[in-house]
Image (tube, grey):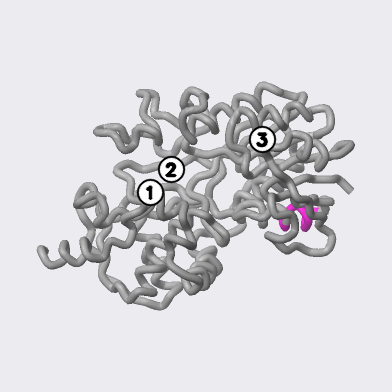
Amino acid sequence: MKRAVVIGASGQIGRPVVAALARDGWEVTAASRGGGRDGSWDGGVRVARLDRSDDGALAAVVGDGCDLVVDVVAYDAAHGRQLTSLAGRIGSAVVVSSVSVYEDGAGRGFDTAGEPDGFPVYPVPVPESQPAVAPGPATYSTRKAALERELLSAGDELPTTVLRAGAVHGPHSPLPRELYFVKRNLDGRRRRVLAYRGESRFHPASARNVAELVRLAAARPGPRVLNACDGEAPTAAEIGAAIDTVMGVETETAPLDGPPPGGTVGASPWSVPLPVVVDMSAAERELGYRPVVSYPDSLPETVDWLTGALREGDWRERFPVMARAYPGSFDYAAEDAWWERV
């Protein structure tokens, strides 16, 4: 039986990755900061406590060697060097990166998106050959680019599949974008506003589909970069409608031409002025990838999880990352004032 170590096993992507590899016959060690405290798997899965900043701890989890390391929380060049330093003891690796590394060829990317005329103009869809931002320590995107460069420089010494994920969704997310619609419905808000006419597209990636890509790449090791998203990229309006269907509610939506008034009204987490849609044909061609779940079919478990989480307290306390990223998500007073003017 081949042995796999999953780093970040208790998180949103790590949980389905552990499950997918175990089902595929791997002997899996689920490594996380909390060890077995933060996740539950079938009896065949081993658990290990891991402080990612401790190089010795990672080496100890790998032990005398393993066939595969899956890293869903690697962030920068230092994490890449941690893995490449163990190249002689690791057969291959699969590491999750982000579509945020892409730039549009004119120097625009996710880091410039908030500047005037700074939103990137990507091709639709974006292939893996699209230029990436310069690697460095400055931002999330440049750090992910530095991680990728470090890993890919190892070549066949540590054949690594880099997966560039989009807007990841599913239970246990620290940034659950679906909360934008779920909380509104639970709060009895039956009217909403969507900027850019609700036509924005920011390619989602089910954690279960990312896990399927991990499973496939594990069986076919090689140095490569692949996009990692769902089979479809619904619009913001379509996402809202799909969540309404799951929750059994009817809503009225006002589609706005252009950006959100006041910066918050209609500013859903998918509301971008230009599409961010990636090309999944390389994953299909190289790995035989087919999504294991569609976006609408993935929603019931996400909605159930979010509904339960909201019972536990204020959304800002329960999801601090979401609160920092989208602080004005539930500015109902501004929305009501807008409706009164129209």
Marks 1 and 3 close (CB-CB < 8 Å): no
**Magenta: main secondary structure:** helix
Q: Quadrant of the C terminus?
A: bottom left
Q: Quadrant of residue 154?
A: top right
Relative depth, front residue between 333 and 126: 333
Residue at 35%, 23% in the rendered image: 106
Marks 1 and 2 close (CB-CB < 8 Å): yes
Relative depth, front residue between 194 and 123: 194
Sequence-wise, which precedes: disc 1 or disc 3? Answer: 3
Q: Which residues are magenta?
A: 19-24
Q: Is residue 242 left or right of residue 274?
A: right
* Label 2: which secondary element: loop
Mark 2, other Cα within 10 Å: few <14 / some 14–19 / many ≥20: many
Question: Is 229 a magenta residue?
Answer: no
Amino acid type assigned to the residue bearing label 2 in the image? Val
* Label 3: which secondary element: strand
Q: Position of residue 253 (x, y in %)?
A: 26, 65
Q: Position of residue 279 (x, y in %)?
A: 50, 40
Q: Is residue 292 left or right of residue 294?
A: right
Residue at 47%, 58% in the rendered image: 319
Q: What residue is shown with label 3?
A: 161
Q: What residue is shown with label 1?
A: 201
Q: What residue is shown with label 2?
A: 277
Q: CA distance from mark 3 to mark 2?
A: 20 Å
